[in-house]
Image: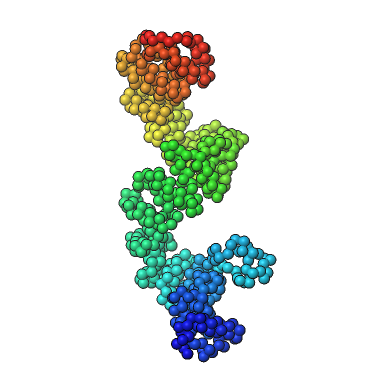
Amino acid sequence: MTAPLATAAPWRSAWAKVCAWFAAHLPSGWVPRLLLPHADTFATAERAYAERRFSDAVALFRTLSAQGEVQADWRLGQCLEAGVGVLRNPVAAVKSYQRAADAGVVAAQARLGEVYLTGLAAGDLLSDAARASLESPTAGSSFFRRLYPEGLDVAANPQAALHWNRLAAAGGDAGAAARLGHQLACGLGGETDVALAAMQFQSAADRGQVMGELGLGLLHAGRYGGVVDEALAIRWLERAAAKGHSLAHLTLGLLLLEQPLAVRDMARVVTSLTYAARAGEVLAMYRLGELQRTGDGIPVNSVMAETWLRRAAVKGSVPALVSLVRLLSALEYPDYLTAAQLCREAADRGDAEAEYLMGVLCLEGRGVEPDATDAVRWFERAAKQGFVGAFERLGALYAEGRGVAQDYAAAAHWFGRAAAEGDREAVMHFGTLQIHGLGVQQDPLAGLAAYQAAAEQGSSAAALQMGIAAATGARGAVDYAEAAEWYRQAAASGRPEGAYNLAQLYLQGLGVQADHLAATALLEAAAAQDFLPALRLLYALALAESKGVGSLDAALGWLVQAASLGEESAASTLAALLDRPEQATSELVIKGLERVAVSGSAVAQTALGDAYTRGVGVLVDLENARRWYGDAAAAGSVVARTRLAALPGAKADTFR
C-alpha cells in the first residue's frame, strides 16, 4: 500500500491534509507516526519542494513540523518568507525559523542573525490602502488583521542578531561569522571587540566567504578603527572584488582614491568605481561623476560626469544633485535654469551646500529672478546648519544693506563667525570694519593686522590692501619695497589690481628697479582679465612708442578691447581717430569700431554712421550709414537720431 501512495500525488496530498487536520486539532505531537504513510517523510517533502510542487511541500512541512521535525520548521520558514505554496508572511516565517534555531539548526540560526541585523519587510505584499487598514488602531477583526494578526514586518534587532550570529558562527556558518565580525567591529548589538571581529572575519575568509574578505579589507583600511594596513586591506578587497562583489569594488576604489595623487593608480580607481557603479552602487556613481567633473587625476569629461551624477541623483543622492548644480553652472554655455531646479530640490531636502548655492543663484539672478531678500533667506538656512560660506555671504549682505536692512553689527557678527572657522576673506572684511569703526570699536591697527593675517593665509584681496597700506604709509612710513611684495603676491593669485599696481611701481622705479618690459607683462596679464585701467595704460604706452602708422596696430588693439567692454571714453577716443589723415589708420579704426559697435556701443555705431556718410576709411554707403545711425538712435543717441533724419535719399560712391 505504501508504493502507490508514493507515486499518486492526489492521494498523497489528501492524506497529508488529513494528517494536518489532526495536527491542528489535537495536542502537539499527538499524531502517531503510524498515521503517516511511509512515503510522507522529510525526504518526500524535500522532493516535492525540489519539483516545485510547493503546496504539497508546505502541507508536508506543516505536518512534520507538528511532529517536531526541526528541519521541516526551517523549510517551512523559507516557504513562508518567499511566499511559495503559501501566502507570504515574514512574521510567521521568523517564528518557524525560531523553532528550528532553538532546536540547533545552524541554517535557521544564521538566517535569524541575518534577518534581525537588517529587519525583514513584507514589501509590496499589500497595497498601501490594505497596509493602512491592517495598521489602523480601529482595524479590530478586519480581514487583513485575521490574515496577519501579528503584522507584516519584522523589525531589526541588533541584540537578537548578535545572539543568533554568534550561535551560527560557532556552528560553522561562514556568513554568520562575517556578520558577527561586522557587529563586533561596529558595536551593533551592544558589544564592541575589534580583535574578536578580526578573528571572525578571518574565519569566514578562510572558508572563501566573500563577506569575510570584505570585512578584513574594511578592517585593515581603518573603516572600523584600529591599525591601518593599506597593503593588506587592498589584498583582501581585491580578493572580494575578484568574486564580483560590488561593495568590495566600491571600497577598493575609494581606498585607492585616498592615496597621494603622485602614486595613485587612477586606472584601477576608475575600473573599480565603474564596476561598482554599473552594479548599482550609488556612492560609486557619485564619486565617478565627481572625478570626471573636477578632473582629479583624470581628464575632465562633462558628458560622462553628468551621466553618472544624474544616475546617482535619480537613486536619491543629494550630493550628486549638488554636484550637478556645479557642473551645469560651469559649462561653456551654462544651463542655469536646470541648475536652479536641481539646486532647489537638494535645498528642499535640507542640504546645507545646496541652500548656500541657492542663495548664490538668487543673488546673481542665474536660473531664477534676482532676489537678494530670497538669497538672504537661503544663506540663513545654510548658516543654521553651520555652512561657513554662508556666514561670509551674510556678513557682506548686512554690510551692504542688500536684501536686508544695513546692519554693521550683524555684519561683524557673521564675519566674526566665518573668521573663527578659518575663512580668510571674512578675516579681511572684519579688518575693514575695524579700520572704519563699523559695527565694532574703531581700531585701524587691529584692522591692518587682520589684513596681514588674511594675506598670509592666501587672500589676494588682503594682499592687495596690504600693498596699498604700505604704498600710502597707512602703518607709518611709506615702504614701496614692501608694497611691491604684497602686490606681487596679489598678482600671483590672479588679482588684476595687484598686477596693475606692481606695474606702476616698475614704470616709476619705486621700491623696485625700473623695468618697462616687466611692467608691460604685468599690464598685459591684467588686460587679459579685462581690467580697464590696464587696457587704458597699455594703449597710452603703445601710442607713446608708436613711430609711424604701422605701429598703431598694438595701440588700437588695447583701445578696441577697452571700448568693447563698454568703456565709452575709449570708444570716443577710437572715433576721434577717424579724423587722422592717414588712410591706413582710418581702415584700422573702422575695423575696431565695427568690433565695438557689435557689442552695443552707441558711440561706435554713430561713428560708423559718420564714416559711411563721409566716406572715411570706407566707400560712402548711405544705407550702411542709415543702419548704424538707426542702431545708435535705438540705443538712445540723440546725435544719431539727428543725423539719421538729415541723411539725403541719394547714394554717392566716392572715396576720400
Looking at the image, residue 257 sits to the left or right of residue 423; the answer is left
Would you identify the image quadrant in which residue 442 lies?
Answer: top right
Residue at x-position 47% and y-position 64%? 186
- All told, the count of numbered labels is 0
Q: Is residue 210 above or below residue 431?
A: below
Residue at x-position 41% and y-position 72%? 174
- Specify whether residue 563 is in view: no
Q: Is residue 224 above or below residue 600?
A: below
Query: Which percent across, then down, holds residue 255?
Result: 38, 56
Query: Which percent across, then down, holds residue 633?
Result: 51, 18
Would you identify the image quadrant in which residue 148 lies?
Answer: bottom right
Camera-side residue: 317 or 652? 652
- Specify whether residue 12 is in view: yes
Looking at the image, residue 3 sits to the left or right of residue 25; the answer is left
Query: Which percent across, then down, holds residue 639?
Result: 51, 13
Residue at x-position 59% and y-position 36%? 403
Tell me which colouring the rendered structure shows. rainbow
Q: In this view, does 57 lie above or below 614?
A: below
Q: In which quarter of the image is the C terminus?
A: top left
Looking at the image, residue 463 sits to the left or right of residue 66; the answer is left
Camera-side residue: 282 or 501? 282
Camera-side residue: 595 or 264? 595
Q: Is residue 531 above or below residue 88?
A: above
Residue at x-position 48% and y-position 54%? 315
